[in-house]
Image (cartoon, rainbow, N blue to C red):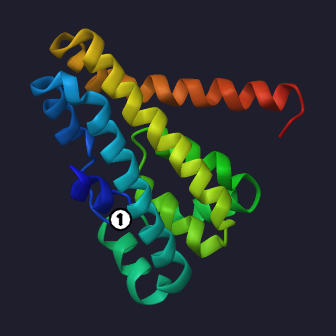
Amino acid sequence: MAIVSFIESSFFPIPPDVLMIPMIIARPSRAFLIAAVATVASVAGALLGYYIGAALMETVGQPILEIYGKADSFEEMSAVFNEYGAWAVVVAGVTFLPFKVITIASGVTGLPLGVFIVSSIFARALRFFLVAALLWKFGAPIRDFIEKRLGLMFILFCVLLIGGFAMVGLL
């Protein structure tokens, strides 16, 4: 679990949920421990992605983005980082958007490391602990909802949250 969570945040294409969900269904009493391990490992992997972006963009980062066909989306996301970096990290961290693109972009664009770490911890903890709590409370029957609709719910939540802040003039 830790290894998958770590490498998913920087270069691996498979999200940790694929492993986390069956692990929690098999051992519900360990749901929150599994979520904690996924969170810590994911944030550690995000730091590797940040480093790839900051120090190794030309030699490592660009080839990884090209392998996954994300070079174009990377350019678009870099522009967003100039103004909304923390929000971009949170949105990608809680949704099923490719978090690795955001971690690398954060390093390339020079998003302050403290902002990046706090945003990553918040987003990944929210995502993994919510999944753990739902599985702990409802068990296997909630699995279909998590796999098919939770990403959309997170995106809707982020849109409403950002829209609310924009309406009151905090952005």
Dot 1 alpha-carbon crowd within 10 angstroms: few under 14, some 14 to 19, many 20 or more: few
Q: Quadrant of the C terminus?
A: top right
Task: Report which residue position mark 1 lands on.
Answer: 69
Foreground: 168 or 2?
2
Residue 157 versus residue 35: which sits nearer the camera?
35
Q: x%, y% of residue 35?
A: 33, 37
Tell me, yes or no, if residue 94 can be seen here. yes
Q: Amino acid at mark 1?
A: Gly
Residue 156 horizontal side relative to residue 146, left or right: right
SS at badge 1: loop
Task: Tell me which corner region of the image, top left, top right, bottom left or bottom right, holds residue 12.
Answer: bottom left
Residue 149 higher or lower than 126, as above or below: above
Q: Nearer the viewer, residue 19 or 14?
A: 19
Query: Does residue 84 appear to the left or right of 19 in the view shown?
Result: right
Q: Is residue 119 left or right of residue 99?
A: right
- Residue at image location 39% in from the left, 46% down from the top: 39
Q: Residue furthest right?
A: 169
